[in-house]
Amino acid sequence: MQILACKGDTLSLYSERFDLPHALLVDSNPHVTHDVLQEGEEIYLPGYEAHVYKVKKGDTRETIVRELDTPVDALTSIIRSPLTAGEEIVVPVRVKKAVINGQKNYDFTALMNDLQTLLKLYPFLRMYEIGKSVLGKPLVEIQIGRGSKHVHMNGSFHANEWITTAVIMTFLNDYLCALTNGKKLKGANVRSIYERVTLSIVPMVNPDGVDLVLNGPPPMEPYRSDVVSMNGGSNDFSQWKANIRGIDLNNQFPAKWEVEKERKIPKEPAPRDFPGFSPLSEPETVAMAQLTKERDFVKVLAFHTQGKEIYWGYEQLEPKEAEKEVNEFARQSGYAPVRYIDSHAGYRDWFIQEWKRRGYTIELGEGVNPLPLEQFPDIYEDSLGIFLTALQME
């Protein structure tokens, strides 16, 4: 929420009054360039919502605090005159639970709506457009934290694996809520993580494909006719993995791409497995490659489904510390670590090949894609330790 500063107020004062880390206030208010705030200056309070409260006879600051469960010092910044029965005052109330629901059909609209909700409530989040999909949907990166160690996570490279986006967004919400409330998340001190780590998230790499799976073919031609043709005339797109042009985005990276091209069937655009006519031919993979080159990630985690496995090696190029970390992932999740598989041209393969750093593909859940939403609670519980381990391990 926003409040108007009084003369002489500072962000340090608000940090004490609202029980918020000074760093979160600074990062939520990049427009503030001076120590002492100007009278009437708008200040964002992360993790708080405005609650309109009608004053009752006999109310005091203390009774309002008890009723609304808000810090008593917070009202000092809001209530500056005697209370009058019947008047309405705006009270800052801390948000103490998740505000988004990941257990739903998680298409591009759901993603963007939830991101706007989180950005409004947690303005220290940073959102960047890193490119556009074939159909012009923005490919967004979310950044959180101020540390020098940059860790990247992504989801929905494959269209019918859209549940990975829902899992990532649920984790992001829980992380943000723990930050502003000063709570640990599964034993992890997230405020310490915020200072040490910058987390980069691309929650939906393939928005056109996800929307195709969940909502059917797009209205515009030639894409509408093309996807129906590639899908054998069927309007059931539940098994579609590719982008809207029939290119498998996780077979698009220049890590022995030629090997995949020769052995992959089909040999033309299709619902799955076609690596394209050249590496990095699609705007989605170009955007991911450019982001990765610019950000200097120390490790990357690509979330897929299904199999309850974690792939962590490529061509013996992975660093030695990867084995220790993947074993901790396995301990936290119950998933099986798998060092090598006979596969190339994936995002993780390319990252390990080019940077010789830790890269992981996490296959969430088990069964047949797309995984049913009934699995969501178990998938999230299993993956939470992976998220937090990745942010904590050096």
Image: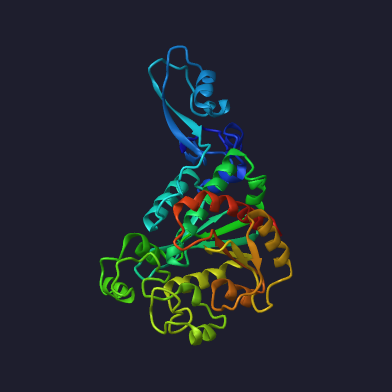
Q: Residue furthest front?
A: 367
Residue occupying image coordinates x 27% and y 75%: 222
Please give the name of the residue rendered at 42% of the width and 82% of the height, measured from the top-left corner: 266
Question: Residue 388, position in %: x, y?
Answer: 63, 53
| Vertical relation: 348 (above or below) 84 | below
The residue most toward the top is 58
Does residue 78 lie above or below 390 as drawn?
above
Residue 14 position within the rendered picture, expressed as x and y whole percent measured from the top left: 57, 35
Report whether 283 appears left or right of 35: left
Q: Nearer the viewer, residue 53 or 259?
A: 259
x%, y% of residue 59? 48, 15
Q: Quadrant of residue 340?
A: bottom right
Q: Is residue 250 visible?
A: yes
Percent of width and height locating residue 40: 46, 36
Tell whether 1 sits left or right of 341.
Answer: left
Q: Is residue 209 left or right of residue 165?
A: left
Q: Which residue is painted at 43% across and 12% down in the image? A: 57
Q: Nearer the viewer, residue 178 or 295?
A: 178
